[in-house]
């Protein structure tokens, strides 16, 4: 804090010194008809910006508004330097005459946070700097005397001039003035739109800034029209010039009032919010609306934390991700009773007011906890809807597969068998040996057909599961698995039919996956029942890396388990095996 | 006997069926001159072999028997051949598709015999 104060004191001293230098330049100018008045106006405006800027900088060190205000003051002093009699000094003034206005534009667009909201604003500000400085650079190359700029008779010689061409310098001034007029119109539209989008609290802070800033810019535009486009240097130009100077001088005070108001109004906003939320018990309050108003950010949204899922959902229950750095959005976590409830996602322009967002979040904690229940409910409903749709489609797929398996498998063999028997009948008298060979062929087709039917029936529902229970059915599965299966922890007791069936298909799918992908040496299957919950797990020592989203097989199993109010978890780090665990409620 | 069409192209994607039906046709006195396991092979085999009869399964891996029949009919001499559609499904499963197709007729695989074939080929 002390180093900041020293730095600010140093900047203040530099500002004072620069002002004194500029004052001296104006007072000693041989071209200025009213040097005392001009010096007083120049110093008043420059020091006002520097002084109020340093004050704002000191009070809100993280906010760049103060630094920008100070910068406007310093760059403002560059303009009057053009009055100097020394050509080398005067030329600096000519080139940077309009720089302060470009800095002011940046200040206006970044108020109150001090940072530009997005890349587009950045480009807009950069364009402003280009319009302010680039044409001046060209102008000094074509103007040997400074008459075009200051309309004086005894102007100093310009050391940088390479050509003397009045047509070109007039054209440059005309182009610059026209560009500046279009630019300032766009700027005023942008500022008014931003103001309209702000909440009550932020509007209070923005209004004095906008009124003084926009007025000064509008008068500057008028001045450009009168002096540069109409080429009037008479009374009208003087009046507009005077009005613009007064408006310009009032800007720093507008900013100061705005900054102070934003401090006070923030406190008011939270107080109002707390009162609003207090009424939430008796009437329904839109918490998002209340917070958006309090913080002046219409785009504010909540992301509710669902610990069971380990993810965030929005108010409709749809998954939502927290914003990344540099995305233009920021977030603040809301806790209640030490428990993470939600995240508030807001425009990064509010970053400077993180404290305010946090206190608003704390005020809304209880109400948000209640809303989270609703969001969770909606998330569950939409998850349920999705899983129901998946179950219907899985059942359709299964029926199609059974039809196809029957048609391509057993049915084809039976058809071939019938044909073979017909051939045998025609052979039996003429060529009994051939008939015997054909009948053997038929018998083989019959046995293939029956074994295919057996496989198919087992896939639909294994009879051993119905007749002899889960342990026997799992033993049969293990017997067919190409990877050795350890069954020592399989509970040998009957469970409810749906749970037995789901457990069987969990193990069946898991063993199929192990055989196909895991490259494992050993699989361990465990079935236990504890406190009314049946737990089935299949762990292998293979390559790992399995995911529910990886194949529809596990997704179907998950839906089947979820339909029984159970959960399916997969732990499968690459290189350290896979463990699939299903837990399902199961009263004995 | 000589007037009866005799050379047959068997089109079916099931090896077991092709084997059995070829044996059956030979036993009935037909001459099986080629076999094909899918639609495009069937069209190619037809233009090469010019069989008098095509025993054509409806369900094939690339395109179905109706499409094969249409393509064969569009070939030179394609309409002279007797195309007999067959399937392990019933005639009623295909609705009006068989009537619209340029084929001699349909015999389900269950009913495929010397008599049903002779009746259709007349």
Image (spheres, rainbow, N blue to C red):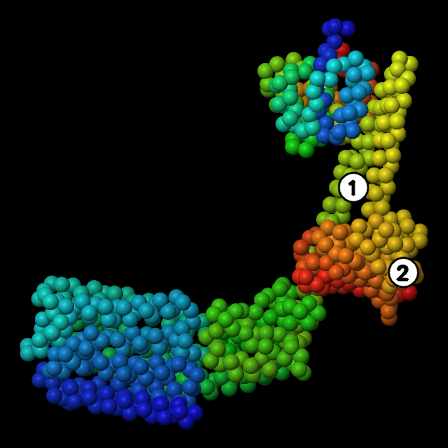
Question: Which image quarter is the C terminus of chain A in?
Answer: bottom right
Residue A223 in sight = yes
Judged from the image, the secondary structure of the residue bearing numbered disc 1 is helix
The extreme top residue here reads B2
Q: Image height check: is A441 above or below A91?
A: above
The residue at the point 37 percent across, 84 percent down is A66
Percent position (x, y) of residue A265?
47, 84
Q: Image height check: is A432 above or below A191?
A: above
**Disc 2 vs disc 1: Cβ atoms closer than 8 Å?**
no
Q: Image height check: is A355 above or below A146?
A: below
Judged from the image, the secondary structure of the residue bearing numbered disc 2 is loop
Q: Identify the mark at residue A402; answer none if there is no mark.
A: 1
Q: Chain of mark 1?
A: A
Residue at image mark 2: A495
- For the residues labelled 2 and 1, the Cα–Cα distance comes to 28 Å
Q: Identify the mark at residue A559; answer none if there is no mark.
A: none
């Amino acid at each position: 804090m002390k180093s900041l104060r020293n730095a600010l004191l140093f900047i203040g001293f530099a500002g004072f010194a620069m002002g004194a230098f500029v004052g001296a330049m104006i007072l000693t100018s041989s071209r200025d008809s009213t040097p005392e008045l001009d010096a007083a106006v120049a110093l008043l405006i420059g020091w006002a910006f520097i002084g109020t800027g340093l004050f704002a900088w000191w009070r809100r060190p993280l906010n760049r508004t103060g630094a920008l205000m100070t910068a406007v003051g310093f760059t403002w002093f560059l303009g009057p330097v053009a009055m100097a009699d020394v050509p080398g000094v005067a030329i600096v003034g000519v080139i940077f005459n309009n720089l302060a206005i470009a800095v002011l534009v940046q200040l206006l667009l970044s108020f109150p946070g001090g940072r530009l909201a997005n890349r587009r604003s950045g480009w807009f500000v950069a364009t402003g700097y280009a319009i302010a400085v680039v044409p001046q650079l060209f102008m000094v190359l074509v103007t040997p005397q400074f008459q075009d700029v200051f309309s004086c008779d005894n102007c100093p010689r310009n050391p940088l001039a390479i050509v003397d061409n009045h047509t070109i310098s007039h054209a440059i001034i005309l182009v610059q003035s026209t560009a500046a007029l279009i630019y300032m119109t766009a700027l005023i539209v942008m500022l008014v739109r931003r103001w309209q989008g702000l909440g009550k609290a932020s509007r209070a802070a923005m209004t004095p800034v906008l009124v003084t800033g926009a007025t000064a810019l509008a008068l500057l535009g008028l001045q450009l029209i009168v002096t540069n486009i109409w080429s009037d240097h008479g009374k009208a130009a003087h009046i507009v010039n005077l009005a613009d100077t007064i408006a310009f001088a009032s800007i720093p005070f507008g900013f100061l009032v705005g900054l102070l108001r934003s401090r006070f109004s923030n406190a008011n906003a939270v107080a109002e919010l707390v009162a609003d939320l207090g009424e939430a018990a008796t009437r329904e309050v839109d918490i998002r609306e209340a917070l958006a108003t309090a913080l002046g950010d219409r785009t504010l949204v909540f992301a509710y934390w669902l610990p069971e899922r380990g993810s965030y959902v929005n108010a409709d229950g749809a998954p939502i991700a927290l914003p990344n750095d540099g995305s233009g959005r920021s977030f603040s976590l809301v806790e209640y009773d030490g428990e993470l409830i939600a995240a508030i996602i807001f425009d990064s322009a509010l970053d400077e007011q993180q404290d305010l967002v946090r206190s608003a979040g704390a005020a809304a904690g209880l109400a948000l906890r209640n809303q989270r229940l609703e969001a969770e409910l909606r998330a569950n409903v939409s998850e349920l809807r999705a899983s129901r749709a998946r179950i219907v489609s899985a059942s359709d797929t299964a029926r199609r597969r059974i039809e196809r398996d029957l048609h391509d498998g057993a049915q084809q063999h039976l058809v071939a068998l019938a044909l073979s028997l017909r051939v045998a009948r025609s052979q039996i008298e003429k060529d009994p040996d051939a008939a015997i060979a054909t009948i053997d062929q038929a018998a083989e087709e019959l046995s293939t057909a029956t074994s295919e039917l057996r496989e198919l029936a087992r896939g639909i529902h294994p009879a051993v599961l119905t007749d002899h229970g889960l342990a026997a059915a799992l033993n049969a599965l293990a017997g067919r698995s190409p990877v050795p299966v350890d069954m020592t922890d399989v509970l040998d007791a009957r469970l409810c039919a749906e749970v037995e069936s789901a457990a069987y298909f969990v193990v069946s799918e898991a063993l199929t996956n192990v055989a196909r992908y895991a490259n494992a040496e050993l699989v361990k299957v465990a079935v236990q029942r504890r406190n009314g919950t049946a737990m089935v797990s299949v762990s292998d020592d293979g390559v790992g890396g399995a995911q529910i989203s990886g194949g529809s097989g596990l997704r179907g199993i998950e839906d089947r388990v979820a339909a029984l109010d159970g959960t399916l978890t997969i732990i499968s780090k690459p290189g350290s095996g896979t463990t699939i665990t299903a837990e399902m409620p199961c009263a004995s | 006997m000589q007037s009866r069409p005799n050379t047959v192209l068997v089109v079916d994607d099931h090896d077991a069926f092709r084997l059995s039906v070829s044996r059956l046709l030979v036993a009935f006195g037909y001459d099986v001159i080629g076999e094909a396991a899918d639609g495009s092979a069937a069209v190619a085999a037809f233009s090469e072999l010019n069989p008098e009869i095509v025993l054509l399964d409806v369900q094939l891996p690339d395109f179905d028997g109706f499409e094969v029949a249409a393509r064969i009919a569009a070939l030179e001499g394609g309409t002279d051949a007797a195309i007999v559609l067959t399937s392990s499904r019933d005639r009623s499963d295909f609705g009006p598709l068989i009537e619209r197709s340029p084929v001699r007729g349909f015999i389900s695989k269950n009913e495929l015999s010397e008599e049903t074939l002779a009746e259709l080929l007349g």
